Image (spheres, grey):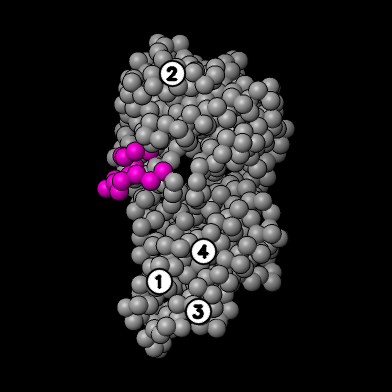
Amino acid sequence: MSESLKGIGIGSKVAAGTTIVVRPAAGVDPNEPASTEADSPRVKQALKAVADSLTEQSALADDDAAGILLVGAQLAGDRSLAKKIDKKLAAGEGVTHAVHNAVDEFAQGLSALGGYMAERVTDLYDIRDRAIARLRGLPEPGIHLSKPAILVAEDLSPAQTATLDKSLVLGIVTAAGGPTSHTAILCSQRNIPAVVRAKGLDIDSFEDGTELVIDASTGTVHFDLPKDELNALQERAKKREDLLAGSSGPGATADGCHIQLLSNVASPDEAESEGVEGCGLFRTEFLYLDKESAPTFEEQVASYKTVLQEFSGKKVVVRTLDAGADKPLKFASQEVEENPALGKRGLRLSQAKSELLDTQLKALVAASEESDAELWVMAPMVSTEDEAIWFAERARAAGIEHVGIMVEVPAAAIRSANLLNHVDFASIGTNDLTQYTMAADRMQGDLGDLLDAWQPAVLDMIALCCEGADDAQAHVGVCGESASDPLMALVLAGLGVKSLSMAPARVPAVREVLKMHSIKQCQELARLARSAKSAQAAKQAVLQYADPRVKDIL
C-alpha cells in the first residue's frame, strides 16, 4: 500500500485513528442442494424478515437514517425481485444461489439506468447479504464497534451507514461510492470526515488496527504520517473552523457585487433557512419516486407549503419534476431506451405526461398563496426555444410569476439568449452540463478527469450562458456541485453568475472567499481558468493568483 491514497473528500475535518475493516458478507452456501418447493416460501419469509428489521430500525433512527433504511425495506419487498428469485428456484438453483444470482440481474438493470437508481445497487446488495445470512442461519452482516475507529470498506450499505454510532466513528474510507452516494451524503450531514472512491484501496490486503489519517478537505488518506505533519493538518482544520465560525450575511465580493448564496433542498425535512438568502434548488422528485401512483394535489400542496414557509420572506427556486433516465416513475413508464440519459427525461417527460406538470404547477401556486416566500419555478433539461416557450406559457397560465429553465445541455448554453427571451431566469446544472459537454457519463468514476467542472470547455459553456443572459436581461445562477467549491465560486462570479446554490454547510466558506476579491479580480480569475489547457491547470492558475488567504479556507 502506498504512503497515501487519493479519493473524493467529504467534509473538511481531519481524523486520525486505528482502522476496523468491514469484511464482505459470508455469501452463498457452496454445498447446498438443488431447490425444492419449500424454498420459495423460505425466501419470501427471509426477505420479509429483512424488510421488517430495517423498518424497525428506521423507527429508532434519526430522520436522515430513517429514510434510507425505509428505502432498503421497500427494495426487500419489491415483487419483481421476488419473481426473479422464483425463476431461479424453478430452474433448480440452490436457494442462496438463486437469491444471489437474481439480485445480480436486478442490480445490473439498476446500474444500466445510472444516477439515482444506480446508487440503489448498494442497498440491493445489502438486502441480498442479509437475506442469505438468514437462509443460512447466520447473523446478519453489520458493524459492531466497541471503541472509536476509522471504518475501511469496499463500500458501506445505506443501512450500515445509517445505524452507525457517531460517537465511535472517527471517519470512513471506501474504495467505491461517489459524491452523491448514501455514504457521502450521510457523512456530510453528520459531519463525519470521509474519503470515498479511494484509488488503490485494496480491502483484501488491509488489516484491522492500521494507523490512518483522513484529510477530508483534500480527499487524502495518509499512512504512517509523522506526528508533526498530523499536528499541522489538525491545526489547519482548526484554523479553518475558526475562520468560518462567525461567517454571516449576504454573499458579496469585496467591492459589493451581490452574489446570492442559496441552499439546495431535496425534501421538506432538509429545509433550513438559517444562514442563507433563500433556496436555489428545491428538488421535487422525492414526492414521485418509488410510488405506485402520482402524488395527489393535496399531498403536493402540503409538502411545498412546508418548504415555502421555512423560507418565509425569501426566494425559493423550485425545479419541476425531473424524472426519467436515472429516476424512472412506475406510474409514467416510457418505452425502453438504449440510452436513458439522452431520452425522455426532465421536461421531455413532462411534455409526454403533461397532466403531471399541470397538477404540480397548480399545487405550487396553491402552496405559495399560504406563504410570503418568493416562488420561482424552473423546468429541467430544456434544450430548445420551443421547449422554453412551451413551459413558460404553461407555467404562467397556472399563475407562476417567476418562470425559468435549467441549463444542463450545450444547446441551451449556446442559445441561451434566445431561450431566455421567453423566461425570467436560468439555473445552470453543472453536473449534467459537464456530462453532456464532455460526453462522459457522470456515474463513471474512472472518467473523473473529464467530469471535472474545471474543464475549460465547461467554463466556456457557462460563459456563453451568462453572455446570453446579459443580452436577455435575465438572472442566471448555478445549482450544481461546483457552486459549493469556494475557488470555483470566484470563477463563476467572474463569468457573470448572480447566485450560487449549495448544501448549507458549504455556504460560509464560499461567502468568505468571495469577500476577499473584487468582481474585477473574479473576472481575471475566470479569464485565466478559461485560458488553461486542462481542468487541473485551470484550478491551479486560479489558486496561484487568488488571495493567499483562500488556502486557509479550502
The residue located at (68%, 62%) in the rendering is: 165
Q: Amino acid at mark 4?
A: Gly
Pick the front one: 295 or 33: 295
Which residue is the site of mark 2?
393
Which residue is the site of mark 1?
85
In the rendered image, is residue 311 in sight? yes
User: What x and y, as percent, mark residue 134?
Assistant: 54, 78
The mark found on residue 77 in the picture is 4
Q: Is residue 47 above or below residue 58?
A: below
User: What x and y, as percent, mark residue 1?
Assistant: 44, 66
**Magenta run includes residue 335:** yes
Marks 4 and 2, how far apart at CA: 42 Å
Q: Amino acid at mark 1?
A: Ile
- Residue range in magenta is 332-345
Tell me, yes or no, whether the two marked residues, 4 and 3, touch with CB atoms within 8 Å. Answer: no
Q: Residues within 10 Å of mark 1 (few under 14, many from 20)?
A: many
Q: What is the magenta segment's predominant secondary structure?
A: loop
Marks 1 and 2, how far apart at CA: 48 Å
Which residue is the site of mark 3?
42
Q: Mark 1 or mark 3, which has the lower sequence index?
A: 3
Q: What is the secondary structure assignment of the residue under circle 2?
A: helix
Q: Amino acid at mark 2?
A: Glu
